[in-house]
Amino acid sequence: MLRSVTKCLLTNPVSVCRRTMSHSSLVGKTAIVTASTDGIGLAAAEALGQRGAHVVVSSRRQDNVDKAVSLLLSKNIQVTGTTCNVGKSEDREKLVQMTVEKCGGIDILVSNAAVNPFFGNIMDSTEEVWDKILGVNVKAAFLLTKLVVPHMEKRGGGSVVFVSSVAAYQPMQALGPYSVSKTALLGLTRALAPELAHSNIRVNCVAPGVIKTRFSSALWQNEDIVDEFKKQLAIKRIGEPAEIGGVIAFLCSDDASYITGETIMATGGMSCRL
């Protein structure tokens, strides 16, 4: 068998290359990426757009949306932008409806939106803090998925990617409730994957390590914290948003057609487990 495979590669190099390119191509696909005007969300939108997808970016502020749309257009990416607070049901519905009206359907959802209004000892966190964090980071992620699934089914399938965190595996000091919400996304991924597989919809998750974004600036701008993190890393540096965007784009492509219910850890080699 190995001999026949080798012969095929030697005699059909062009067809192999074309097949590989088509697998990674997202031409004709429409992708919603939440919280996508900065950081990992913007990097994911760019990576998907570079592969041919029409990306729909959003955040709570119109000026941020305008900047992101302008940036992506300058890179010849098909993009539509709108404001959206994923914690509000009316905003989630508006986002989905607008996408279907302007793009004709939905193939990809990257659920990246998250909040963290609390920093301190977990025992000092309040009910309001938990409601806010779980409401946006977990419940809204599920409810938005529930909204897009019927539209993915109409297209014959789709891909959902939740953006979790290394904190899901190794809770960070002073970020207890946030860490718990990111652990919940691992469970949501595993719960949804078998149910949606019947509709040819794959559900996966990405758990980034410390990435150089505005959201995590309190961590990577502190040299003492960075030095402590580097001791745990095989790759001795802080990650870049584009390095997570590429992983997300892979999971949304046909190259990942046999992957569902999984979480890819992109942490620079940090050793973590539940």
Image: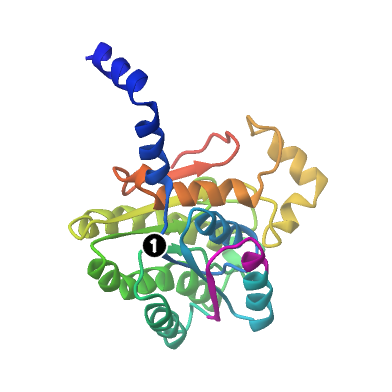
Q: Which residue lies furthest to the bottom in this view?
A: 90
Q: Quadrant of residue 76?
A: bottom right
Q: Residue furthest right?
A: 223
**Magenta span includes 271:** no
Residue at 42% of width from left, 84% of height from top?
89
Between 75 and 195, the residue placed more toward the observer is: 75
Residue 83's place in the image compared with 108, above or below, is below
- Left or right: 212, with 192 as reference point: right
* Residue 44 point in image, percent of width and height: 54, 57
- Left or right: 256, with 48 as reference point: left
Q: How many labels does the image show?
A: 1
* Residue 205 point in image, percent of width and height: 42, 52
Residue 11's place in the image compared with 233, above or below, is above
What amino acid is at disc 1?
Answer: Gly
Query: Quick one: label 1, few (<14), some, or many (20+) residues within 10 Å?
Result: few
Residue 110's place in the image compared with 246, above or below, is below
Residue at 62% of width from left, 65% of height from top?
72
The residue carrying mark 1 is 28
Instruction: State the quadrant of the N terminus.
Output: top left
Between 38 and 188, the residue placed more toward the observer is: 38
- Left or right: 173, with 31 as reference point: right
* Residue 111 point in image, percent of width and height: 46, 64
Q: What stretch is highlighted in magenta?
A: 71-84
**Magenta span includes 80:** yes
* Residue 114 point in image, percent of width and height: 54, 67
Residue 231's place in the image compared with 247, above or below, is above
Q: Quadrant of residue 255?
A: top left
Q: Quadrant of residue 29?
A: bottom left
- Left or right: 201, with 182 as reference point: left
Residue at 34% of width from left, 26% of height from top?
12
* Tag 1 secondary structure: loop
